[in-house]
Image (spheres, grey):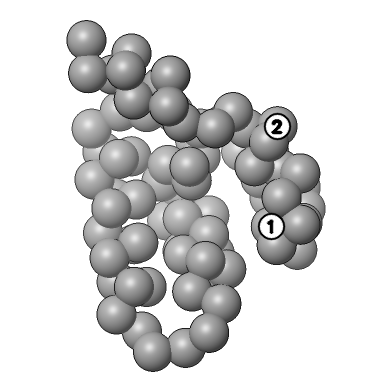
Amino acid sequence: MARRMIKKWMPNHEKIRQTRALKVFGSLLHDANLWHLNRRSASGAFAVGLFCAFIPVPFQMLLAAAGAILFRVNLP
């Protein structure tokens, strides 16, 4: 039940691919593992996002997206 509710609120992959800030990554966003919602992917994405949140640099979203692509965890 929680998975359906979370999937309903998550943006779809086309909307994320069209985000101006993430166009830098181009075809790397086509990896299917970035869009799956499972226990490993969600926990890894949380860890990458939490790590990037504590780095005092501008453009933390780009660092978090690069980390998600590098470690192949859930991007949204």
Q: Residue furthest front?
A: 9
The CA distance from mark 2 to mark 1 is 12 Å
Q: With respect to residue 10, does 54 lie above or below?
A: below
Q: Is residue 52 left or right of residue 70?
A: left
Picture coordinates of residue 12, whole percent (x, y): 59, 28
Q: Are discs 2 and 1 less than 8 Å apart at CB?
A: no
Specify the quadrant of the image occupied by residue 22.
bottom right
Instruction: Kindly identify the amino acid type of the residue bearing the numbered disc 2.
Output: Glu
- Residue at image point 70% right, 32% down: 14
- Residue at image point 32% right, 18% down: 5
Q: Residue furthest bottom?
A: 56
| Marker disc for residue 65 | none
Q: Residue furthest top?
A: 1
Q: Residue under label 2, please give it.
A: 14
Picture coordinates of residue 34, whole percent (x, y): 51, 39
* Secondary structure found at label 1: helix
- Classed neighbour count for the residue bearing mark 1: other residues with Cα under 10 Å, few (<14), some (14–19), many (≥20): some
Q: With respect to residue 48, does 6 lie above or below?
A: above
Q: With respect to residue 20, does 3 lie above or below?
A: above
Residue 51, visible in the rendered structure: yes
Q: Earlier in the sequence, mark 2 or mark 1?
A: 2
Q: Residue under label 1, please give it.
A: 22
Residue 70, visible in the rendered structure: no
Closer-to-camera residue (5/35): 5
* Secondary structure found at label 2: helix
- Classed neighbour count for the residue bearing mark 2: other residues with Cα under 10 Å, few (<14), some (14–19), many (≥20): few
- Residue at image point 27% right, 65% down: 50
Picture coordinates of residue 8, whole percent (x, y): 43, 19
Quarter that holds the N terminus: top left
Instruction: Kindly identify the amino acid type of the residue bearing the numbered disc 1.
Output: Leu
